Image (tube, grey):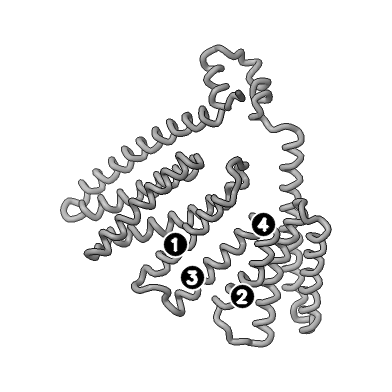
Amino acid sequence: MTASKSQIQQWAEAGALPPGKIGEALKVAGVTPAASEWRQFLERLLLGNGGAMLMSSVIFFFAANWEAMGRFAKFGLIELLLAAALTVYWRFPTRVVGQASLTASAVLVGVLLAYYGQTYQTGADNWQLFASWAALILPWALLARSASLWLLWLFLVNLSLMLYDSVHPLLWGSDGMQWTTLAFNTVALVAWEKAAPATVTVASRSGPRLLALASGFAMTVLTIEELISPDGWRFIVVLSVYAAWMAAFQFAYRRLRPDLFMLAGLCLSFIVVSSVGLAKWLFHGDGLGAFLVISLWIIGISSVAVRWLKSEHEVMSHEQA
């Protein structure tokens, strides 16, 4: 059995582990990164910085030489960069540089579409640009199975839905966009978690955590809006959906796939929603007294949430040991 970091700290505090042996114990337990892990981290960090700088140089090059370049020269340069990025991915499909090149090529597809629309004045709405962009890179995302590419695709779909809703409302009422965002990102989160392996690194959890943030933000905003302006049966429906959403997240990220970040987000959402509901109920008389009660409530519920998260962290550490 491999000891966790918290267990080693407990042994050190209890005096069972000499202070001079803590570093060695962390290394034996695999808590301290090995030299190969540091090298892999630095390779990815430098590659990411290099790719970002390369994309920035392309943007500044276009900005500085835009007027001097002809129409076909601009098209040719964008397509040349797109072909070069795809060539790098074709040569190194399983390496990090190949995955980064594929993501860069997906970004260049959007640049090409934007320049085409600007040059020929197609008259298309903004949402059509991002929807077309998402549709064109979807086969790449399916074939490459790249997390960064899937995140880009999900961002484009969310942006397309937001822009489309501003022109053609998706659902009835003013909160149609929140319901759509909640449904889409929750379904995407479930699909991502089912497709992801059971044992993953912290870095690979960025995708589902971002989707959970989008889903949680939409659910929290919906609930707050209904608490501020309750509307009969809609009030009951929204609170029921919120309770079901909270229960599902708590079960999924405590029992099925333990994740303290998700549980912390759940606590934050409940603190915000409960504080807004309390404020709505109290602000009818003495405002000073209401502020005092709400402040005490936030302090108290935050303390309870911190204690619960600490206990859950200890339980998760023992389960993973």
Tell me which residue sits at (80%, 69%) in the image. 83
Mark 3 Cα-neighbour bin, 10 Å: few <14, some 14–19, many ≥20: some
Q: Which amino acid is tagged 3?
A: Met
- The secondary structure type at the circle numbered 2 is helix
Q: Which residue is mark 3?
A: 162
Q: Nearer the viewer, mark 4 or mark 2?
A: 4
N-terminal of the pair, mark 3 or mark 1, is 3
N-terminal of the pair, mark 3 or mark 2, is 2
- The secondary structure type at the circle numbered 1 is helix
Q: Which residue is mark 2?
A: 132
Q: Position of residue 265 (x, y in %)?
A: 44, 47
Q: Nearer the viewer, mark 3 or mark 1?
A: 1
Tell me which residue sits at (34%, 56%) in the image. 241
Q: Position of residue 293 (x, y in %)?
A: 24, 44
Mark 1 Cα-neighbour bin, 10 Å: few <14, some 14–19, many ≥20: some
Q: Which amino acid is tagged 1?
A: Ala
Q: Are marks 3 and 4 in contact (CB under 8 Å)?
A: no
N-terminal of the pair, mark 3 or mark 4, is 4
Cα separation, mark 4 vs mark 2, equals 20 Å
Q: Is residue 321 above or below residue 88?
A: above
Which mark, by number, is residue 183? Answer: 1
Which mark, by number, is residue 145? Answer: 4
Q: Quadrant of the N terminus?
A: top right
Q: Which amino acid is tagged 2?
A: Ser
Tell me which residue sits at (79%, 81%) in the image. 68
